[in-house]
Every structure is written in C-alpha cells, then in structure tokens.
Image (cartoon, rainbow, N blue to C red):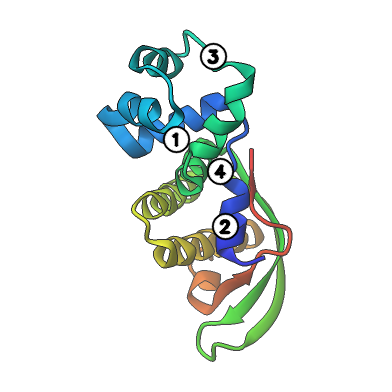
C-alpha cells in the first residue's frame, strides 16, 4: 500500500478518546464549538467529552471516531509511539528512480533520532504536507534500518533509497 493508504489506516481512531484528542489538536481552542456544531451536541457536552468526565453515548461513539481527521490521528499515534513496525518495504533508488527490491525494515525501537524524525513527520501531516511527510517517513525508517544493521551508518540508506510501498502498512506501539 502506498504511504497515503498506510497513513489513512494508521489514522483510524481506536476509540473516542483518541478521536477527541486528535480533534483538539486540529481545532485548538475552538474544539468544543466544532464538536458541538458538527456532532449535534451542546457546548457543555462537548466540553465534558474533552475533559474526559463524560463519555459519548454508545450510539455517538462511532460518529466521534469518524469525525477525527486521519492525518491528526496518525500524527498523534506517531508522537506516542515507542516502536514502528513496517515489515518488508519496497524501495526505489534515489539516483535512478527505479525499483530496487525490498528491504526487511521490520520493527524499529524508538531512539532519540527516530523520535525527532517521527515528530517531523507528524508536523507535516498536521500541516497537510503529505509529500514532505512521506519523504521524512522514508528517511526516518531507512535511517533506523541502517542504524540497526551497522554501528554508525544511519545516514547511508536514506541518501540512497526511498520507500515506495508499505505492503504491510505502518503500525505503531
């Protein structure tokens, strides 16, 4: 699956609290008003949902989860991640633009460099800059892949290879 499809899959809110957090990240101080207007509840109910002091009725939870923008849900998931799993990815050569097989990136545990890079991916997603997010994600994952396989070569793979496809998607824990 391509990057956009993988992000849309990662961007499905798992529960109403994750959705409200993503809505808050997107709408800031106007969150209660946005929830009230778009989900048909009172301002006070919207404020209670944000505070976590009241859960939406079971019949409304699905609509709350769907209301969250996938890019903001995915950005939040990336910021909270302690590991990223992508399995085998298909790569292209940056110099020729041609397919260069696949690489077994697998699961990358969070380190300070990967954390910084994933935070940048999240920022690009929230800004609606999908192409920049895709490039940063590819560089972050290929850098982590390089670092896991050699002592100090984090910079090599991102300069040579770009991820073109995520057959297993992107999963975070």
Element at label 4: loop
The residues bearing labels 3 and 2 have C-alpha atoms spaced at a distance of: 39 Å
Q: Residues within 10 Å of mark 3 (few under 14, many from 20)?
A: some
Q: Which residue is mark 1?
A: 22
The residue labelled by disc 3 is 55
Residue 145 at x, y percent in the picture: 62, 61
23 and 104: which is toward the camera: 23
- What kind of element bears circle 2? helix
Asked where in the image residue 133 lies, by quadrant, the reply is bottom left
**Numbered disc 3: secondary structure:** loop
Q: Is residue 27 left or right of residue 160?
A: left
Real-space Cα separation, disc 4 to disc 2, in angstroms: 9 Å
Horizontal placement of 168 versus 48: left or right?
A: right
Residue 133 visible (yes or no): yes
Give the vertical position of 100 relative to 165 (above or below).
below
- The tag earlier along the polypeptide, 1 or 4, is 1
Query: What mark, if any, has residue 144 been given in the picture?
Result: 2
Q: Please say if 49 is above or below 150.
A: above
The mark that comes first in sequence, 3 or 2, is: 3
Of marks 4 and 3, which one's residue comes earlier in the chain? 3
Mark 2 or mark 1, whichever is nearer to me: 1
Q: Which residue is mark 4?
A: 110
């Amino acid at each position: 699956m391509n990057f956009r499809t993988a992000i849309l899959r990662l961007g499905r809110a798992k529960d109403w609290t994750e959705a409200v957090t993503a809505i808050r990240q997107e709408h800031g101080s106007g969150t209660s008003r946005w929830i009230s207007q778009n989900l048909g509840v009172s301002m006070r109910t919207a404020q209670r949902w944000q505070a976590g002091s009241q859960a939406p009725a079971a019949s409304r939870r699905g609509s709350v989860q769907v209301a969250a923008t996938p890019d903001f849900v995915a950005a939040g998931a990336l910021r909270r991640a302690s590991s990223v799993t992508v399995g085998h990815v298909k790569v292209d050569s940056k110099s020729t633009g041609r397919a260069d097989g696949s690489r077994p990136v697998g699961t990358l545990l969070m380190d300070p460099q990967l954390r910084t890079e994933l935070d940048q991916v999240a920022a690009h997603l929230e800004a609606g800059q999908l192409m920049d997010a895709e490039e940063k994600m590819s560089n972050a994952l290929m850098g982590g892949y390089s670092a896991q396989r050699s002592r100090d070569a984090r910079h090599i793979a991102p300069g040579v290879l770009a991820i073109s496809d995520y057959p297993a998607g992107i999963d975070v824990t």
